[in-house]
Image (cartoon, rainbow, N blue to C red):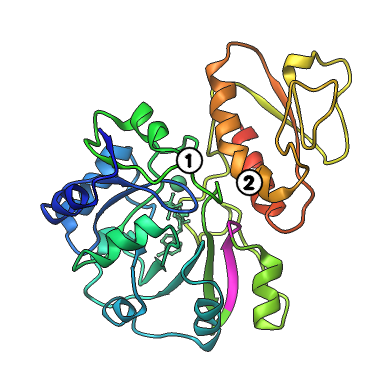
Amino acid sequence: MISSDLHEAVRLLSAGKLVGMPTETVYGLAANALDPVAVARIFEAKNRPAFDPLIVHIGQRAELAQLVTHLPAEAEALMQAFWPGPLTLVLPKTEAVPDLVTSGLPHVAVRMPRHPLALRLLQSLPFPLAAPSANPFGYVSPTTAQHVMDQLADQVGFVLDGGPCQVGLESTVVGFRSDRAIILRQGGIPQEAIEEVLGHAVDSQTSQSRPDAPGQMDSHYAPHRTIHLLEHGTRPTDVAKESWISFAPHAEAMASLAPDGSVATAAQRLFGVLRHLDQQPGGPVWIEKAPEIGLGRAVNDRLMRAAHRA
Ligand code: TXA
Ligand code: MG
């Protein structure tokens, strides 16, 4: 069921059950991060391979001490700037974090979401929440409570409704090499904003060929219809109106990713557009990429994975 009953969510999570939870990025499938049996239920429900580690969500800074053993100065600066918000930090883990959460890695991914209901939920619980995006493994992430129910109703009895997600795609994941930040997944905090806080350029290693962020398959967010990408500013030739989604509105396109032409709007709408396409019958679809700036990087990253055929 879809509900805004916070107390019921607290009760279920305290009993080791799974709950769909809103965040500002996408909906998560949450369980007690410190309970390996509850965490195992997440992998089972999503049909997620055990080599793909989970993000641990916290409601206050004080919880970090229980989870991580070392905080690089750059991590501290990024937390100051972007928490609560769509930024995940990968840090050396304590023994309190079950190996299943990190897929056996010595590091744990931690984030503090800024969605008010998510924060209230986390602050009402005596433990942090492990939560991947609440979609079957390899499919598009959910940006409404209904999306979660559409695909995981049999596995998740309860979704806490926090309305449509404001950011619309997942958090930026940042790891550290010799205490220097490196972007492992483009997401809701733009690379430029991170570089501005740190005062230097930051590497981005987000392909599957880098094992640093396991679980980032080149093929992901895979709709059933074939997707072809168009470079930003280009249009397809000899393609019917029904098969073309432009970036900004175009009279000859079926729809646009960003009716107002902004990358933030494209980010917010992207997964809903992919889902909608999948519900329509039809052949291949051509989608114009975003400009490769700000949130456009994350939009293009998700589009490339959606278009990738294994
Ligand atoms: O916005 C988000 O991050 C959403 C919401 C629910 O918080 N969560 C999310 O989780 O996107 P998920 O499981 O779909 O993606 C988490 C990704 C993993 O695939 C992996 O790339 C990276 O985060 N990750 C998690 N733990 C890691 C670790 N210990 N080391 C390196 N990368 C890690
Ligand atoms: Mg995911």
Placement of 243 over or under 195, stated as above or below: above
Q: Is residue 34 rendered to the left or right of residue 25?
A: left
Residue ID for mark 1: 143
Q: Which mark is residue 276?
A: none
Residue ID for mark 2: 267
- Residue located 21% across and 45% down the image: 41
Q: Please name the predominant secondary structure of the magenta segment in the image.
A: strand
Say which quadrant the C terminus sits in: top right
**Residue interval drawn in magenta:** 181-188
Q: Disc 2 marks which amino acid? A: Ala
194 or 226: nearer the viewer: 194
Badge 2 density bin: few <14, some 14–19, many ≥20, Cα 10 Å: many
Q: Earlier in the sequence, mark 2 or mark 1?
A: 1
Placement of 114 over or under 91, stated as above or below: above
Disc 2 Cβ-to-ligand 1 distance below 8 Å: no
103 or 230: nearer the viewer: 230
Residue 226 can be seen in this image: yes
Placement of 150 over or under 296, stated as above or below: above
Q: Quadrant of residue 153?
A: top left
Residue 217: horizontal and vertical position, in percent? Answer: 52, 45
Q: Say if mark 2 contacts mark 1, CB within 8 Å.
A: no
- Residue located 67% across and 45% down the image: 265
Q: Quadrant of residue 206?
A: bottom right
Label 2 – label 1 distance at C-alpha: 11 Å
- Tell whether position 185 is magenta: yes
Badge 1 density bin: few <14, some 14–19, many ≥20, Cα 10 Å: many
Q: Disc 1 marks which amino acid? A: Thr
- Residue located 65% across and 64% down the image: 204
- Tell whether position 72 is magenta: no
Residue 55 can be seen in this image: no
Q: Secondary structure at mark 1?
A: loop
Residue 46: horizontal and vertical position, in percent? Answer: 32, 39
